Amino acid sequence: MRGRPALFTRYEADSAMLPTITQRVWLAIGLVAVIGAAVWLPRDWLILIATAFIAAIGVIGLNLVTGYAGQVSLGHAFFLGVGAYAGAAFGGEATEKLVGMGLDVIFWLPLAGLTAGFIGAAIAPIAVRLRGLYLAFLTLGLVFLGEHIFREWESVTGGPGIGRKPGVLRLAGWRFDLDGQIAGYSVTREQQIYWLTLLVLIIMAFAAKNIVRSRIGRAFAAVRDRDIAAEVMGIDLTRYKVLAFGVSSFYAGVAGGLLFTVTGFVNTNSFNLLLSFTYIAMVVIGGAASITGSIMGAAFLTLLPRIIDGAGGVLPFLEVGSTGLLSTSQLERIVFGALIIGFLIFEPLGLNGIWMRLRNYWKAWPFSY
Amino acid sequence: MTATMEQRSPAESTKLASLPARLRALADSRPGDIALREKEFGIWQETTYQEFWHEVQAAGMALWQLGVRPGDKVAIHSENRKAWVIADLAAQAIQAVSVGLYATNPTAEVAYLLQHSEAKVLIAEDQEQVDKALEVESLPDLEKIIYVEPRGVRAYTDARLMSWSAFMGAGESALADDPHRVNGLVDTIDPEETATLVYTSGTTGAPKGAMLSHRNLTWASESAEDLIAAGGLPKGQPQLLSYLPLCHVFGRLYDVCGALAMGSCVNFAESIETVVADLAEIQPTYFPAPPRIWEKMHALVNIRMSDASLLKKAMYKVFLNTGMKSADRLLATGSRGFVGGIVHQIGYLAVFRSLQRKLGMQRCKQATSGAAPIAPEVIKFFLAIGIPLYEGWGMTETTALGTGNLPGSARLGTIGTPVNGDVQIRLGDDGEILIKSPGIFKGYFKNPEATAETIDEDGWMHTGDIAEYDDEFLRIVDRKKDIIITAGGKNVSPSEIENKLKVSPFIKEAMVIGDRRKYLTALIGIELDTVSNWAQRKGITFTTYRDLSEKPEVIELIQKQVDTANEYFARVETVKKFALIPKELDHEEGELTATQKLKRKVLVDRFSDLIEQMY
């Protein structure tokens, strides 16, 4: 009710994502700022941020299965790879050696997600029987299996060292991956990719937010907190674990399909264990079981190398040319490791935890609880 | 709405000679406005004025079909809820008399009230209340028991039982057959007839049933409008939170009389435990509360602020201090002054806005303390944090209205001035307040001796409160019968001392003793929430209330509170010794009245050993 934000006369209002006008206005301002930023951001930053958007989709997926449903997965790189190649096969150009159906992005992107999703759901029944460390090992195996398949299935992947182009960002003849003109204004390739990936992220994040606050999301949390107790309450473990892996893999597939459209090339050895770990790190640093945290974690770790690069000219011990203690890439790895350790020890709830604490400080004002 | 009240023609006002008639007028003039809200499964379900009046008519017809005729009594034994006001107004509409029972009334009191009132129909809330009525053996007048909540009652076989939905269903079909009967009965209501019986809670002796007429209630309704809205009208419809027992006049004054005067929306609290949460949701426009609620809110803010982080604490302290200063000025002149106003605005934005929202008082235009005396410090605290709290005084026998402090005409520690020109007040020879107003009740039901003792031949009502004048403001000294005369012959007012003690967040109950004794002592009950919080922080372990009360550290803590309170009084008025009551006082066990007032005689008997130890 107007002026009385906590007075609900309908369930729709009670469960609204943005119950107050203030929240809606702030969201609108934020959206306009993010969309408008593309106008003045330089090209390399646009690409970097677009990469962060895509990574965020993948991290949301991993967070659904690991953060919400509590099923540790080290196999996220495999599903990203499945998405990337399915996207390439459905949306790429055919050559004499390679499969390519040349579909529009509106078709191949969901198909990339679905392919990964089906494979995820197909593998899940095995995962249902395993827990914790054993499940981690099983999903680890997927990555090695995947690397092998990607190397050998040359008609789809192009084979090691050769690779192939990803799916083409084309919709009804319009190419998002080429500079163009919209209503008399020239728009660059990078701006278009930025907006397109932002749009996909918004849709996917909104969907995920709704999944986690629905019956499914609560079932996920119940399975995570104590699977036996969840089963006693009537939650079908198999069903929800399969669902968790399926949905998570769908998100990975979509992210994988988009990920290499930015660089324009997919290499078979991209989908290794390091990629899986990077995503796990994004979940941990962003905050497990949080959609906002997923986005923050993805943005933070994607932009980190760039920030460290920028530090190259400032910090005295960094290598300039061939002198100095450390190269920027060495520093990057050290910071990466230190961040994971630091977050696990000091802020297990991640960036989202910091945000929540900040918010609660103001929410409780002038009390402290 | 004020304007429409003034413009009302005399012919029209005869049509408003009862509360049901007022409801009917509202249903005509603003049918779509929300009249009632009741929370069900987390959502506030709304009833418009049109639906409200329709349901009242249906319930009236249902009562009529059950054989209720003008003058018959309909008892309502329930917490505040929609069915309460519907049953109340339905009974009045068919010229019957409603009688409210407290949900906390134990079986013995229920038996007394049902027998004494000769109730023909009982509206009982749930199994608990139904059980109480069924336990009573001789109720020759009671013909029907309507239960509102069917849970647990379905299997009962008593022939008198009937469910609320069946009752309303019967009423609906009767209304369809005979749509004009209730209207006709409402038109022919005699304003001098009894509309409702309000049983006084009875700190001494058995409860007495005060007969309030339709004229009493409509006068209260008219006066309440000016009084309740003295702090200003809101932009939209006024919102009220109904949580004060409706069987008490204080609650009735706001939630029925006041609501029908202003066309307000009455929101029913889920239960007494959820009032704090409901307050934050409803953010009522006008909020009446007894001192106990204000004391508790004051204690809550103190405790929470002492746990707050440094910055928050510091800001709160700064603005509370400035607020206290401007509150003095506000009381003296009616305004905080230019500088004080600006500082208060800054404080409002920085601290008080969110504090008020947490307390549910952000949209409160006028808050009232009544039903018992309140400590001036508490009022000043609320004024300092920007909540316009003023004290009023009234009694069941005056239809809740007597005197009141109003913005611009207030003095701390007094009960203010007569609420309007209709009220005449003079002090008797012994300082007793004598009052004459259109709100004076008809008399006690079946008790002409008590009536004669209360209303003298000239129509003055003897209130039993001793007061003195402070300029034009009245200051209550104490209840006539409570005044202590010490062995030294000194007259002491215990309630003043007790209230000073209860300002401490650690003290819940205090009873000063000293009649015909050498010095004053006190029985003190600790506030479990705050004292246990204090004990936790001091690392004192305890198990029960009794155990906590007996800790030497706690006794020391209370001694400090007593010493602080003693500083305000002359030497003969200080509390020399005190004893902590080893249990929480309870209505069920007869130590408190339904309105949480001390039953002094019971306490003196029950804790005589504790008292004797102090002398």
Image: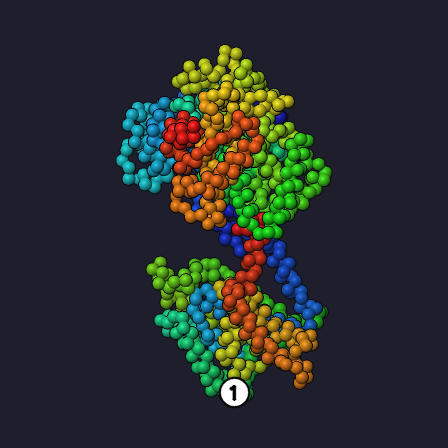
Q: Answer left or right for A315 relative to A90.
A: right
Which one is nearer the viewer's eye here, A319 or A149?
A319
Question: Is there any visible trace of residue A6 in the rendered image?
Answer: yes
Q: Which residue is mark 1?
A: A160
Which quarter of the figure has residue B237?
top right
What x and y, as percent, mark residue B368?
56, 33
Which one is nearer the viewer's eye here, B484 or B283?
B484
Residue A282 drawn above or below residue B177: below
Q: Secondary structure at mark 1?
A: loop
Q: Quadrant of the N terminus of chain B?
A: top right
Question: Is there any visible trace of residue B45 in the rendered image?
Answer: no
Q: Quadrant of the C terminus of chain B?
A: top left
Residue located 54% across and 33% down the image:
B565
What x and y, as percent, mark residue A254?
52, 72
Residue located 37% across and 73% down the image:
A126
Residue B264 drawn above or below residue B349: above
What x and y, as percent, mark residue A331?
60, 77
Q: Residues within 10 Å of mark 1 (few under 14, many from 20)?
A: some
Residue type (three-letter) at the residue carrying disc 1: Pro
Which quarter of the figure has residue A93?
bottom right
Which one is nearer the viewer's eye here, A311 or A182?
A311
Which one is nearer the viewer's eye here, B433 or A141?
B433
Residue located 28% across and 27% down the image:
B137
Q: Which chain's residue wears label 1?
A: A
- In this view, the residue farthest toward the top is B457
Residue located 54% across and 27% down the image:
B571
